[in-house]
Image: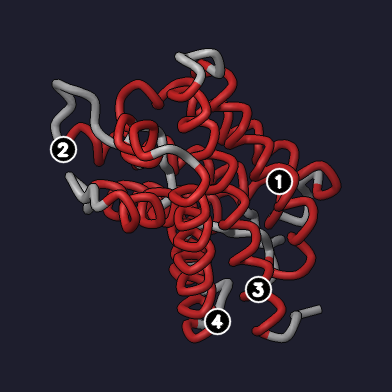
Amino acid sequence: MTQPLWKAALAESIGTFTLIFIGAGSILADAMTGGKVGITGIALAHGLAIATMVSATGHLSGGHFNPAVTAAFLITGRQQVDRGIAYIIAQLIGASVAAFILTAAFPEATRQAVRLGTPALSPGVTAGTGIVVEAVLTFLLVFVIFGVAVDPRGPGTVAGIIIGLVVTMDTLGGGALTGAAMNPARVFGPALFSNFWDNHYVYWVGPILGGAVAALIYDRALSAGVMKR
């Protein structure tokens, strides 16, 4: 049953807020504690945020929390354009509110040290490489989303947990290269309040491209005609 748009948009905003507040917050906490959180803790923070919020709101909005995921649904005709645009706006608002609260909560020195948790390319990683890495990471994320949450043959009851595990996996594998955003909103909110826009386009182009390819492959080649529009 399709929920009223305002309910779905509110769920998207809250879910994205959680991802940025917990995900970027874990990076800030790592900086404040001298690295005690570590890459594993940061990866788990992002993955747990997604797992819990997808499980809590998937029945309300689908639990996208990510413009690249919403774009994948739009490209495959699984979402109306007006609804998709509302989702993306809600996601960016949720990300921005989370970043604003993190700005108020953490000391300036900590915020500046890690750019409020804004993902960035590591030294030696070019913008082109960054786009490819983000595209691959988001490909994996969206492919799994379609496999476990969209395809009716998938394990729907545990979809949120599996999607959270993909985010954790991607963060462990790609975090050292690009920060493993996989999500334009994940970058936009912290960038807005840290004023760090270096290579910002990488985190839109890569995730949207990778997510679109994954969605089209699953939708056209692997769904075997069982996925309802």
Identity, as a three-letter code, of the amino acid under mark 2: Gly
Please name which of the two marks, 1 or 4, marks the residue nearer to the observer.
4
Q: Is the C terminus in the top left, top right, bottom left or bottom right quadrant?
A: bottom right
Q: CA distance from mark 2 to mark 4?
A: 31 Å
Residue 167 at x, y percent in the picture: 56, 35
Residue 216 at x, y percent in the picture: 46, 56
Identity, as a three-letter code, of the amino acid under mark 4: Arg
Of mark 2 and mark 4, the one earlier in the sequence is 4
From the viewer's perspective, is residue 173 above or below residue 71?
above
Of mark 3 and mark 4, the one earlier in the sequence is 3
Residue at position x 50%, y 38% from top?
140
Of mark 2 and mark 3, the one earlier in the sequence is 3
Question: Which residue in the structure is indicated by mark 2?
Answer: 128
Q: Which mark is residue 148?
A: 1
Question: Which residue in the structure is indicated by mark 3?
Answer: 10
Q: CA distance from mark 1 to mark 4?
A: 22 Å
Of mark 1 and mark 4, the one earlier in the sequence is 4
Identity, as a three-letter code, of the amino acid under mark 1: Val
Task: Tell me whether the residue at label 1 lies in contact with that at label 2, contact meaning CB atoms closer than 8 angstroms.
Answer: no
Residue 196 at x, y percent in the picture: 23, 47
* 229 on left or right of 29: right
Please name which of the two marks, 2 or 3, marks the residue nearer to the observer.
3
Q: Is residue 205 visible?
A: yes
